[in-house]
Amino acid sequence: MSCELYKSEMYAWRAGSDAASFRPLFDHLTICPECATLFEQVTASDESLQRTFRGFPESPDLEDRIFAGLARQRAQGAARSTTAKRV
Amino acid sequence: MQISDQTFDGWVRQHHRLLYGIAYWWTGSRPDAEELTQEAFFQAYRSRSGLRDIEAVKGWLVGILRHCYAQMNRKGHHRVEISLDEMTEEFGELNWLNPDRPDLDQALALHQSLKCLDERHRLPIVLFYFQDLSYREIAEALDLPIGTVMSRLSRAREMLHERLSRRQELAIVEKAMRS
């Protein structure tokens, strides 16, 4: 397999992935310094990206708004079933 | 399946932040993300009897979120693209709320890079980096075979890394030219 194909394997790998299916990649990394360097860069960049993805602006009253909307849906549902029973 | 209101409320408490975060990076806009998250929970509540496996609730909710996002795009209801100033302002608030904040420049670079990805790459990549979902859950949420998800993710990660490193290189060149 060429380095180019191992490169796409690198991007398919994720921490916790099934080790056996990525064994050819890790075997290659031990003998190819260029790919090993790239893999290190990808892993470091991934960690930094995860931190960035997890830092998004808060929405402090979102939970309350969801519950208020659900309460409206439930009230409408209760009203509909009362009407249906009367009919 | 019978789902009590109490159980459903528990899911809201447990998962609303995850759904909102995913929606935020999908849309790049806080108001859109809030609207999508609310709509996803309202639709989920109405269709809760359709949930087949209670263990798969997270993937099921993300799947509904994706459905709502597709509806929003079809109707053209999403906000006009937010400006860099608005984005900076939002992250300014984040800085105040979260002391472990990411670097502002990096967050803005990520926004820009995600915008350049097409949807079939942007949707799975956001789910991937949240790390709360397995490949199987991502596949279920996007209604795609797991093999397709893995190949799209591999391509999307490669594109994102390339875009971000190109931006970093450009920033270094610009800085060198200014000094």
Image (cartoon, coloured by chain):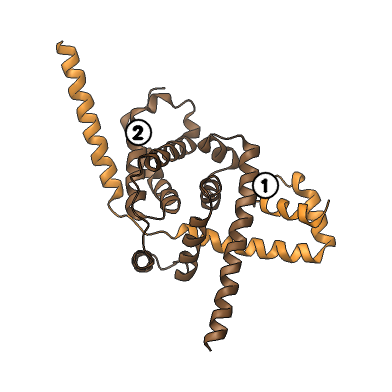
Chain colours: A orange, B brown
Q: Are marks 2 and 1 on the same chain?
A: no
- Disc number lying in front (2 or 1): 2
| Residue at 61% from the left image edge and 48% from the top image edge | B153
Tell me the quadrant of the picture where the N terminus of chain B can be found. top left
Q: Are marks 2 and 1 in contact (CB under 8 Å)?
A: no
Farthest residue toward the bottom?
Answer: B179
User: Is A79 rendered above or below residue B173?
Assistant: above
Instruction: Answer left or right for B172 relative to B112.
Output: right
For disc 2, the neighbor class at 10 Å (few under 14, some 14 to 19, many from 20) is some
Inspect the image, locate mark 1, and give the three-letter code of the amino acid beneath it. Ser
Q: Which disc number belongs to residue A17? A: 1
User: Is B154 rendered above or below residue B149?
Assistant: below
Farthest residue toward the top?
Answer: A87
| Residue at 57% from the left image edge and 37% from the top image edge | B139
Which of the 4 quarters of the picture holds residue B91? bottom left
Q: Residue A14 in the image: state x and y as whole percent.
A: 65, 51
Q: Is residue A79 visible?
A: yes
Query: Which residue position is annotated with label 2?
Result: B43
Q: Nearer the viewer, residue B158 or B79?
A: B79
Which of the 4 quarters of the picture holds residue A2? bottom right
User: Regarding mark 2 in the picture, which secondary structure is present there?
Assistant: helix
Instruction: Answer left or right for B7 relative to A8.
Output: left
| Residue at 41% from the left image edge and 52% from the top image edge | B24
Inspect the image, locate mark 2, and give the three-letter code of the amino acid beneath it. Gln
